[in-house]
Amino acid sequence: MVIHHVLFWLKEPSAVHSAQLIKGLQTLQDITSVRKMYIGMPAATEERDVVDSSYSVSELLFFDDLAGQLAYQEDAIHKKFIEEHAHLWEKVLVYDSIDV
């Protein structure tokens, strides 16, 4: 399984821009290779040196394998999401991992 975790920092953090980004992210569930999807925002957990809650929105996607993750990257729905929502974010970080 491939786990694809993406963190977004909005250019202008607001409830409106967060909602727009989340609505766009929800469209990615329609990509065939996506097995599970979770969308979240920073939790109000205790502050610790190892916790980074500076991001605005995150998505966590699960794929069966690397081929599924590649298919997601090339899917028209994913490309449309980027085209229509990239203006909202100033920074994106991606963490891809495989289960062990």
Image (cartoon, rainbow, N blue to C red):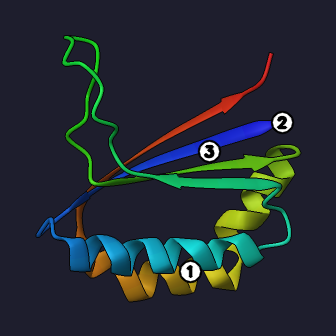
Marked residue nearer the N-terminal end (1 or 3)? 3
The CA span between labels 1 and 3 is 16 Å
Q: Quadrant of the C terminus?
A: top right
The CA span between labels 3 and 2 is 10 Å
Residue, disc 2: 1
Q: Quadrant of the N terminus?
A: top right
Q: Secondary structure at mark 3?
A: strand
Residue, disc 3: 4
When asked about the image quadrant of residue 79, the answer is: bottom right
The CA span between labels 2 and 1 is 23 Å
Residue at position x 44%, y 71% in the image: 22
Q: Position of residue 58 (x, y in %)?
A: 43, 51
When asked about the image quadrant of residue 11, the answer is: bottom left
49 left or right of 29?
A: left
Q: What amino acid is at disc 3?
A: His
Question: Are discs 1 and 3 less than 8 Å apart at CB?
Answer: no
Residue at position x 26%, y 28% in the image: 52
In the picture, the disc for residue 21 is: none
Q: In the figure, 86 relative to 84: above or below?
A: above
Q: Position of residue 48 (x, y in %)?
A: 21, 12
Name the foreground residue: 66 vs 35. 35
Residue furthest left in the image? 12
In the picture, the disc for residue 79 is: 1
Q: Secondary structure at mark 1?
A: helix
Discs 2/1, front: 2
Q: What is the crowding at mark 2: few (fewer than 14 residues within 10 Å), some, or many (at least 20)?
A: some
Q: What amino acid is at disc 1?
A: Lys
Residue at position x 32%, y 42% in the image: 42
